[in-house]
Image: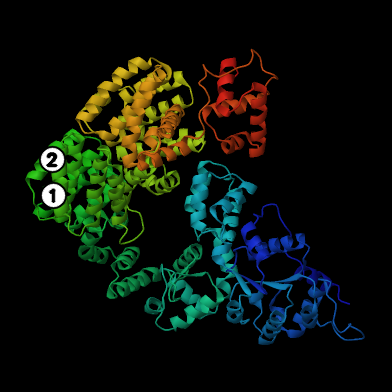
Amino acid sequence: MQPSTPRILETKLNPPAFVATQVPRTAIGEEVASAAVKLVLVRAPAGFGKTTAMAQIRERMEARGIATAWLTLDRADNDVSRFLDCLAEAVQRLGVEDPRGNGGNNPFDAVAALAAHESPFTLFLDDFERVQEPAVLGLVREIVEHLPRRGQIVIGSRSLPDLGLGRLRARGQLTEIDTDRLRFSLEETGAFFGLRQSLPAEMLSLLHRKTEGWVAAIWLASMALERHGAGSAGATATAFVERFSGSDRAVAEYLAEDVLAHQPKEIRDFLLRTSILRQLDASVCQALCPRVDCAAILEQLAASNLFLTPVSGDGDAWRYHSLFADFLRAQLAREMPGEPARLHLAASGWYESHGRPVPAIDHAIEGGDHPHALNLLDHHAAQFLEEGRMRMLARWFSAIPEHQLRGHPFLQPISLWATCFTHGPWDAMRQLDESGCLDSPIAEVRASAHTLVPLLLAMQDRHDEAYEAGRQSLARLPTGLAFADSVLLNAMAHILAVRGDQHEAQRLLDAARREQGNSAFNRMYTESLAGLFDLHEGRLRQATARLRMAVDSTHAVSYNHSHGNAWAGVLYAGAVYETNQLVQAERLLNVYLPLARDVGLPDHMILSHAMRSRLAFHAGDIDAAFQALTELEYLGHQRQLPRVVAGAKLERSRMLLLQGNGPASHDELLRADDPALWDRERRQRLPAHDLDYLALAKARWEIAFGDARAALSVLDAELHAALAAARNRRALKLRVLRALALQRAGDPAAASEEFAGVLQSASQEGFMRLILDEGPAVGTLVHRSAAAMQEGGAGDPILADHLQRLLQAVGPMPAPAESEAPFGGEAMKEPLTRKEIRVLQLLAEGYSNSAMAEKLFVSDSTVRTHLRNINMKLDAKSRTQAVAIARRLGVIR
């Protein structure tokens, strides 16, 4: 008897022990548990958590009363006898009996025993890629083929096993869990770090993107963070995550030991040389590795699942996992220092010869051949500019030394446009001043530079200076430069609209349409402005259609969102938000807000951050709502844009007003009261202040906390001015406030009449949030209008449908106002606990149940219990009434 054998078998016959840092793969477990198939194949490269997922599946099976057995395979199992011995040991642990009775010296026939077993069971075979012996594979095929109805095999493998999978797949007897299914989602990555250490959300998202959900890399990154003492939200963690790549020492060691070191020299050289490619196909690989059969190697790598991810449906193109590619490139540079540059230039030449300028330019720059990259840009940059591919152009130009760019004067204006639309007007203005383009001896360069000046000034919120510079540039048209001329016409249309000259602005927009030709970027610019004009004049439906077209216009080339998309995207998100499509608006903001923030357009920053804050407030996440406004205020101070700072304060005042905090709301209005700024706003038509400006905000506050009659006189004057300027959307908002003022002043009949007019106009265009954003007080008006319509019988179907949607949004009839709230006595039935008072405070501030649960570190059901107790103790019938009674009693403020 050999004492080592039992120990070896125990290792092979049990999965790795469960550890506290494992993240439950619930979705995978449920899929396998519900799959009535013979074979489950869990296939992925090293480090994607195959074994962990299988072990969790096993636990789930056992919890359901299904017998399980585990066998981890190794190279020794290519010996048929050894494999059968190990299999027999595993199968007997299922409680399976030999159908032959297993008497005498007959060995246990595991294959026959499995085929005859009637009770449900699952056999797990891990590390199956270690088995290459045809005889062993034949035995496993036989087992699968003759599995009883209630039997199942789960195989974990790095490569595609030769088990007749096509036949099983065709019969519906195969479930495949592949790399994409095994990748951690962002939520699972967050759960993993939550078990080990804390990491800020932004850093967590960046790390998840870099690892592409690769479990091993996430684990190694967490180990490195712990090792460096960087498991907090400090600068060390941020620096580590930003540096983290496949060349990280822990990842590199893992890959070197587990993958590269085990490859034949031919494969190893191929991996290293082709690592410079973002996409692999046989033709381009052949240009880098002319002495080997690249097509055959790619097929071999794909079959072995060696970190290749297919990027085309036909299976002819792949890419390496990003971390693996990082490691390979670092290894290539160490082993063959001069080879990366040569390989990049070979790839650039291949792509150029095949009419693919983008990768050709990329590889020329990465290979250090900037002159060749500039020559390619001379031929293609103008086309990319017309297409709106600003970020790509900016990336290339930032990688090329300035002195070399000066030798290509026609590229300098293109570089300026790209900087303007990606890094903002301040960087572009500095670059323009240093470039000498304004005084260039080349007329085309000089003209292009001068057309850029008014746009840069307008983007810096200097519209008066922009107008003067633009007048001079308009006098030089046409310059023969279609792109520059069209941008100038669009920019001046916007500047004139801000100055209140709508007729001339529209004329210039029409001219821009005639000039733009095939420029996707300028088409986006023109339609965005036209949509903005429609919006201000109250044509929401037409504005939404134009803005949707503007957003889509630069997607014809690719779906990478350029700043051009962001320009239109924030406005389109606003139109979608107005129709109360809050989920879609939030998705759009997730894409466009960061881009608008990077460029720094004042109106876009205010609109997007205020919208983000309102969405969070509506969802009951008050912390996130205030955070969005704090970020907006910071950006305003950082970029010295007082209007942005004031915009944040106005929106914060509105939010505090909705929370019932009159003094704090008033304080924010005082802080936002910059006379010079708001005097300028009265003279100009600034998009972010069409509905949100100081006079309107003051009137709103008076309606809620002050003299509603005094607010009416202000609103009447503002309404008259808005109608005279055809600012119909603003007029509609002022009429909503006017109805609220009449209601608060004790004239419900006049309020209902005013609101009926609002509904008639709003229903024609679909305006929703313009009404709903005024908070619970508007709910009473909506319900009264619905009651009046019901009494009056059938009417306008469009109006009826719009009113129904408003009713759904405002919910049940609000409880009586605080002064009207019924209250049965001078004392509560039972004192509130400290926790219940805290819940009341959060409730008064607008938090949702789930947000309160998160803030109080309790479950949703616990919050609901607290709310029931509060209502009982205060004798309240609703949340609103509970808050009103608590304030009356002085329990909360």
| 273 vs 425, nearest the viewer | 425
Q: Is mark 2 on a helix, strand or loop?
A: helix
| Image side of residue 881 versus residue 715, left or right | right
The relative height of residue 710 versus residue 173 in the rendered view (above or below) is: above
- Residue 152's spot in the image, x, y percent? 71, 72
The relative height of residue 445 versus residue 873 in the rendered view (above or below) is: below
- Residue 708's spot in the image, x, y percent? 37, 17
The residue type indicated by label 2 comes to Glu
The relative height of residue 144 versus residue 764 in the rendered view (above or below) is: below
Kindly identify which numbered label has been placed on residue 575. none
Q: What element carries label 1?
A: helix
Residue at point 45% right, 19% down? 662
> Within 10 Å of the Cα at label 2, are there few (<14), some (14-19), or many (20+) other Cα atoms?
some
The residue type indicated by label 1 comes to Ala
Residue at point 20% right, 54% down? 412
Kindly identify which numbered label has been placed on residue 504. 2
Q: Quadrant of the C terminus?
A: top right
Q: Name the residue under label 1.
A: 511
